[in-house]
Amino acid sequence: MNVFSPDFLFRNALAGGLLVGILCGVLGVYVVLRRFALLGVALPQASAAGIAFTFLATRHQHAAGAGTHVLALLGSAGFTFGGLALLTLSGRRSRIPEDGRIGALLAVASAGTVLFVAANPGGDFEVTSLLRGELLAISDSDLVILAAASLVTGILFLLFRREILLASFDPDFARTLGKSPVKADALLYSLLGIAISLGVMTVGPLVVFGFLTLPALCALRVAPRLGVAFAIAALVAAASSLGGFAIAYRADLPAGPVDVALAAALWLGVSGIARLRESMARRGALRVVAIAMVVLLAGFALGGCAGGTEPAEEPVSGAPAPLSRGTLPASQRPIAVLRFRNETGQSLRIASSNPLEELGKAAGDPFARRDPTVLDELEEIATQELARRGFVVLSTAETQRAVPTPPSDPGSAALAAKRAGLDTLVLQGTLRRFTLNPSRILLITLDLALVDPRDGHTLWTGTARHPVAVPAAQTLPEAVRDAGPQIFADAFSGG
């Protein structure tokens, strides 16, 4: 249960993905039974088009706040229900087959999404991540809204399940009982619209479509009756969400596509077991195989999540009062932050916002200024974070004039500082990993050492290795500045 604690970095994204997976898995049983699979891919695409249109219309910018997210949710719901309304109204008088109308909606929504993203200069990063099926970091308020909507949808589904069932498979008999098939269909479409619009905002259209079909196919392959099919579909969706997250976290892969791939693997596995069951003569052997399969899946999903994650550190407070020094030793001597060494294999250059300056550098302008890098940003943030913890810190410019070359290890840092005449402690750093994935999760490994140049002794070492969420960052410098306080809180607390 550690993954659902408030300290876990991905708690909201994981819980939101789990809610959407179960909700879509249950409703997907009707999507498959009523041959709505094409509708299941068209509506998520319409929802994505609504999100892209909202970001284009509002000119989404960095740290735009919760208002933009609410508007995007409204755009997602508006386009989803708008597509449903068009299909319903056009179906009454149109001579075009239903699958043709759904295909047209899919084509228009796909083209609209691409055009809206291409025309948007500010929000294309966020929308592109969404379309790739990444699990997005959602706030506590967003998670509450999602949980409340899921609860309401589940209650309505339970209360009117008989009406929906009759309207789906025997509308004439429903009318003889005084039930309205039109109202029941409208309710089913509304529940699908809510699940899809919320799901696309949380996990993306790819994952929504996957969970609307694969868990239902898995459940209907083995369930003896419809009620059991709903339970199996929910179980498969939950196992795919949790197990897929565990695999993605360990392998550094996008979680959404991994969830869908795991759901497909479960479907294939269950289908194989079902075929084996049909060829087996004894029912006892079947029960043993089925129980073993359930135990293995449950152990994999729960054990994988619990063993592959670590609780995230508390974010650094923005209060002006000095922060705790953590494991840093108390010292009255000043500290000089030396240039950090880059061992990531990447340049980590921060491009200029001036296209003419970039053109001059590409042409080999000898007078072009030195490109700033991620390490420059980290050095500045390290200086600020040490000052916030009560240390006297030399300015970055003064330190770099004295020691212009990044030392390779604590020993060479002490030697370089001693030769430069620095009578201070020195902080030496080595950046070994720096990856900003499409979900705007920063994966970093930064080794730090505090050294005394007088005798060459290393007084302290620390490492920042926990992933940091930077959901509002649109550029590389913004990601570094947003993550900086938490990076050094991680390192100064002992790594």
Image: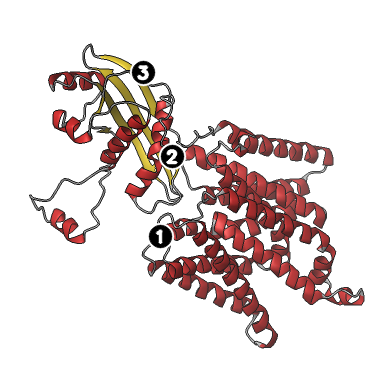
Q: Is residue 381 above or below residue 16?
A: above
Which element carries disc 3, helix, strand or loop? loop
The residue at 21%/26% (across/down) is 407
Which residue is labeled 2 in the image? 318
- Give the mark nearest the N terminus, 1 or 2: 1
Residue behind mark 1: 61
Q: Give the mark, 3 or 1, whose residue is nearer the N terminus.
A: 1
Q: Nearer the viewer, residue 13 or 423?
A: 423
Distance (Cα) linking label 1 and label 2: 22 Å
Classify 10 Å Cα crowding around label 1: few (below 14), some (14-19), many (20 and above): some
Residue 118's disc number: none
Decide: marks 3, 1 in contact (CB < 8 A)? Answer: no
User: Which quadrant holds the N terminus?
Assistant: top right
Q: Residue furthest front?
A: 321
Q: Residue furthest left?
A: 366
Dot 3 or dot 2, earlier in sequence: 2
Residue underneath mark 3: 330
Q: Are marks 3 and 2 in contact (CB under 8 Å)?
A: no
Query: Looking at the image, which residue sits at the far right?
Result: 177
Q: Position of residue 41 (x, y in %)?
A: 58, 65
Question: Going 41% across and 39% down the picture, which residue do you hit?
Answer: 443
What is the three-letter code of the residue carrying label 1? Gln
Contact? badges 1 and 2 (CB < 8 Å)? no
Check disc 2 and report its element: helix, strand or loop.
loop
Please determine whether, in this image, residue 248 is positioned above or below residue 177.
above
Residue located at (81% from left, 62% from top) = 161
Seen in the picture, residue 79 relative to 248 is either above or below; the reply is below
Q: CA distance from mark 3 to mark 1?
A: 42 Å
**What's the residue type where badge 3 is placed?**
Ala
